[in-house]
Amino acid sequence: MRDAGEPPLLEINIASKRYRGAGRVDLDVIKDLRFSLAQGSVTCLLGPSGCGKTTALRIILGLDRKFEGAVTPPVDSLKLGVVFQDPRLLPWRTVEENIRLAAPSMSPSGLEDILQSLGLSDWRAHRPGELSVGMARRAAVARALSVEPDLLVLDEAFVSLDERGASVLRQYVFGVARARGTAILMVTHNIDEALRHSDRILVLAPRPTHVLESFELAAPLVARDATWMETQRRRFEQVVGATGLPQPPRAIASNHATDPFW
Ligand SMILES: Nc1ncnc2c1ncn2[C@@H]1O[C@H](COP(=O)(O)OP(=O)(O)OP(=O)(O)O)[C@@H](O)[C@H]1O
Ligand SMILES: [Mg+2]
């Protein structure tokens, strides 16, 4: 159980992020995006396509330093795990080497355990080019979890998987993170995924993005049954409706972004 008096894991204050455009026209992507991440909490960013979610994650991860504002404490002081939509494995290294490079001090039994849990034992000596999309994604998840991160960042980490594969992988990732008290910051377009696994969904505005609403989900995960999900979907639709944004699609089972807005 988290202590309400605990300091946040991370405070995000992005006053402004702009991309310099080719014709000297700057693109204002983020304006006053502020939120904090509690230790061990699961926060989901949900917002229109192109609003600046990946941009925000890159800033939070310390991959983009060209912005006004601050992320405190500096992310270099945290152990980070990241899974992007594209698995980004080193193509000339095997699955095992990709994991070992991220977590060189991982014990052989720890490595064995993670490979086994993700169904990758038989693929440890294979290179990413030989893997299916689902396997490559699992290898990226193994690499991210192998460092035992304080913060796990998931940018549409379950897209382009079939729903069963996505569901199994989600159970594993969120199960491990919850058991270890790892905080998660995730981006998804799949509202069921957000409702089922988050403690809080931050609804983001179109560009330049900022938080429009914070949607809290206090129920324990075991209580999130079909009836609870339907109630939350309705409540969520009301909250989105009140922001003036169009409703996100109800085709919740889809792991593929189908709506050009959301
Ligand atoms: N390196 C870049 N240079 C210039 N513009 C960029 C760059 N990266 C992103 N953008 C623009 O910034 C805006 C926000 O992009 P971003 O990838 O953060 O959106 P997103 O919210 O993650 O969208 P999606 O849900 O489709 O993944 C978009 O208009 C995009 O075209
Ligand atoms: Mg994105």
Image: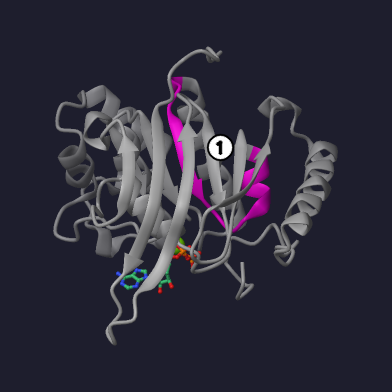
Name the quarter showing ligand 2. bottom left
Point 68% across, 49% down: residue: 192
Q: Looking at this view, is 27 or 161 the one in front? A: 27
Q: Looking at this view, is 157 or 9 the one in front? A: 9
Please provide the residue range marked out in magenta.
180-196
Q: Is residue 139 visible?
A: no
Point 61% across, 67% down: residue: 262
Whole-percent x, y for residue 57 in the image: 38, 51
Residue kind at label 1, given as amino acid type? Gln
Point 33% across, 31% down: residue: 149
Q: Tell me how many marks there are.
A: 1
Whole-percent x, y for residue 227 in the image: 85, 39
The quarter of the picture where the N terminus appears is: top right
Q: Quadrant of residue 226?
A: top right
Q: Is mark 1 within 8 Å of ligand 2?
A: no
Whole-percent x, y for residue 54 in the image: 41, 58
Q: Reply yes or no: does residue 186 show up in magenta.
A: yes
Q: Which residue has dot 1 on it?
A: 171
Whole-percent x, y for residue 155 in the image: 44, 53
Query: Mark 1 falls on what kind of element?
Result: helix
